Each structure stands twice: as C-alpha cells, then as structure tokens.
Image (tube, rainbow, N blue to C red):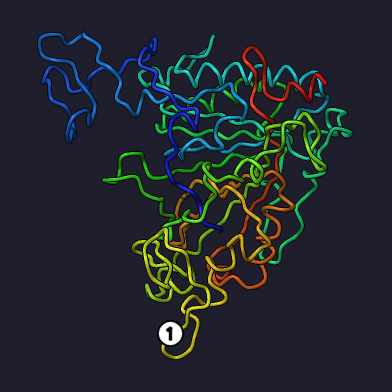
Amino acid sequence: MADIQADTQADSESGTAAAPGITRRRLIGTAGATGVALGAVGAGAGYAVASSNSPEQPQALTSLGTDAVMFHGKHQPGITTPMQARGHLVAFDLAPGAGRKEATALLRRWSATAERLMAGEPMTSGDTDVARDAGPSSLSVTFGFGHSFFSRTGLEKQRPGALDPLPDFFSDHLDKARSNGDLWVQIGADDGLVAFHALRAIQKDAGSAAKVRWQMNGFNRSPGATARPMTTRNLMGQIDGTDNPKTSDADFDRRIFVPASGSAQSPAWMGHGSYAVVRRIRMLLDDWEEQSVAAQEAVIGRKKSTGAPLTGGDESTEMKLDKTDGNGDLVVPLNAHARISRPDQNGGAAMLRRPFSFHDGIGTDGVPDAGLLFVCWQADPLRGFVPVQRKLDRGDALSRFIRHEASGLFAVPGGADKGGYVGQALLEG
C-alpha cells in the first residue's frame, strides 16, 4: 500500500465550484424553532437553522454542501478532485447478449445522470429522494472500461496495450469474484447520503444492460475535521500520502494522463484519460497494533505522529536514505515501505494514489475486516503501478501486515464534452 495523497488542490485545479443556487436542495434547519446553530465554531461553522420567527424560511447550504465538481471537462472528475469523505467502487458486467449498442446507451444514461447529480439535481424520473435535502457535496462519478469490455462489445482492436492484465504478485490472495469487470464506476462525495444516492441511481440506470459484479464501500476523514488541512491517515494510524505527485509538478500530466493524441500503448480515444489500478488491501490490524510505535515507524520509515522521515525534519523534508545511527545502521531500514516505494527507487515510476479506507465488519473471531480500497492513477500502469508493486513484493516490511484480496485495472477515458458522454470517442469511433 503506497503513500496516498491528501494535499488540497485549489478549486480551479479540481474543477470544484460553489453552487449556491441549488434547486430542490436547500438545507432546512432541523432544530425546530430554537434558532440555535448546532456545533458552530466561528463564522459559518455548523448547519444553519430556521429562526423562531420564520420556521419555513430556507437557509443557505453550508460550504460543505455547496461544493460542486464539474462533470464536463478535459479529464473525468474523481482523479485530481480532492479526496472525499465517502466513496463507493462498483464493477458491472454486461448482461448476456448485450454489446456495443447497449453499452453506448448505458454510457449515455450514466453520463446524463452523473451530470445532474453532481450539480445537485435529482434524477429526471424515479428519484429516491435520499439526497433531497443536500447539495452536491463534492460528488464525483468516474467511469472506466475493463479488459473484458472490449471483447464483449466487438472493440478488441481498440483495446489499449496498457490494459493488458496485471502480472501475478507473490503477495496476492485475490478473490476473482471481487476483481476486474467489464465496467467500473467510482463514486465519491463529502456526504454519505449523497454518495449512496448516486450509487443507487447508477445501479438503476444499468437496468437490464449490466449487472453488478462487485461493490465496495469506503471512507476518509471528513473535510474540516482537523484544525488545518492535513494529509490523511489510514487505519494503521499512519499519515499516508506525503510523496504523492502534485498537480503543480511540471511532469504531473505526463505521468498521470494519456497525451491528447494517444500514445504507443493507448489509442487516440484514450486522450486525456488515465488508468486506474484498484486493489482491496486487507490490513491485519491485530498484528499491527501489537507492534510498538518504534517498530511501526521502522516498517514505514516515517514518524507516526507527524509523517516526518525518521532522518529528521517535518513531513515535507526530504528523506536522507544514507543516514546512519550511532551503531552504523541505516536510520531508514532498507525494507522500509517509504524507502522502497519512492519514485527514485523505482526508475522514476510514479502514480497518483487516491484511496478510501474500508471496514466491512468484525468476524466471529473478533478480527476486523478492514483496510484500504487502494486506487491509483497513471498514464501507463506498466510504468507506474507494476514496477513499484514488484519492488514492494520482493521485500517490503509492510507486507507481513497486509493482504491483497482483490484487484482490477480499468481504462478511464478523458472527460465528456458538453452534450456528450464518457467513452463517446470509443463507442462511436
């Protein structure tokens, strides 16, 4: 499990915008006529409620609810969008007999639904009203194609070389029923009901054209839960995301997105797109929590409290790989996760990690089924994810505390033009 980013991008970079004029979606006070703001700390904090003199007067949404991500654009949303508090990952298989025609109609429906829901609007018909009282809440919906999609639709000649199946890794314990799929959808939002509403809408839109193959639920820290923006923590308690590529990096687009005209491994219809590797990584938390903090820090190579490298400084300080202690031993062990996963230790291989944590209950033995829904983005997974995972597979100290239980690789085309739909260049090309 490589480090995951949580740095905050500007709204202009992420395609996030305030949406104050949301129809049908007004936050109305739930504290009756008391006129009290619950949990407010400072100006604008908490939820506004109706005053005692005008209990029917609707109030403006809080900033958390008004944040909206744009559906249309050069890239699909949910890649550089700041990490959201709630997420759903779901894969579909086309129904028997369904082909290119049915897939085209489905992507049209899904794109239209995603556009409406991301703007804070209900479905055109059959809306469940689950998110009636909420704003967009930074909802993003992202669509991708699996390796099997192309044979199912007669588009084998358009299948990217970069979508070749991932190699087997020694640490894999993969459940095939929860891996891969013809189609993949990533949903993220800062409100749990908004995210679930989108999941149900996407499932209903699939109709008879496609059926759910697998579905997973995740979460992250909620925006505003800390006094200042911070890199997120995973369920091991480690700050996770320090070394992620940033949109301000000069080579960010080259590493994460396919060029506009395509590439040697990606046809032109993948222009401005990216490839998502999805892994369900179980954390063996009982074993991990038995370790001392010092032992945990040696496994990662960073301080648990601050995320700073063991060689000193703060979270952003460059790690001194050659630094030794008084006994002549390396301060950051050779098998430390942060050392092995660094781009400069993997021929420059880099990927944008954007995951969700998961917890799917506690077994009868008292062991939690919890960990990371790892999602990483790159222009070419064979140059991004694969070399790093191979290196980790050979000697990462973290390997004894995690288990890779499901896997998928999906081609995520560029964003849809206004009036168009995701995958249009492929399906109508």
Q: Position of residue 273 (x, y in %)?
A: 68, 34
Report the quarter where the N terminus lies.
Answer: bottom right
Estimate how packed mark 1 is, as few (under 14), some (14 to 19) or many (20 or more) residues with alpha carbons within 10 Å.
few
Amino acid type at circle 1 is: Asp
Name the residue located 77 percent from the left edge and 29 percent from the top edge. Answer: 269
In the image, 205 versus 145, the foreground residue is: 145
Picture coordinates of residue 47, whole percent (x, y): 24, 26
Is 310 left, or right, of 340 in this rendering?
Answer: left
Which residue is depicted at the point 70% across and 40% down? 410
Numbered-mark total = 1
Q: Answer above or below: position of 222 versus 13.
A: below
Q: Residue at x 89, y 33 (%)?
A: 157
Residue at the farthest bottom position: 327
Give the quarter of the image for residue 79. top right
In the rendered image, residue 220, in percent from the top left (x then y), is placed at 42, 44
> To which residue does mark 1 refer?
325
In the image, is residue 272 above or below residue 117?
below
Relative to 148, is 67 on the left or the right? left
Quarter of the image holding residue 259?
Answer: top right
Q: Nearer the viewer, residue 364 or 237?
A: 237
Relative to 34, residue 307 above or below: below
The quadrant of the rendering that contains the C terminus is: top right
The x, y position of residue 335, in whole percent, is: 57, 74
Look at the numbered disc 1 and give the secondary structure of its residue.
Answer: loop
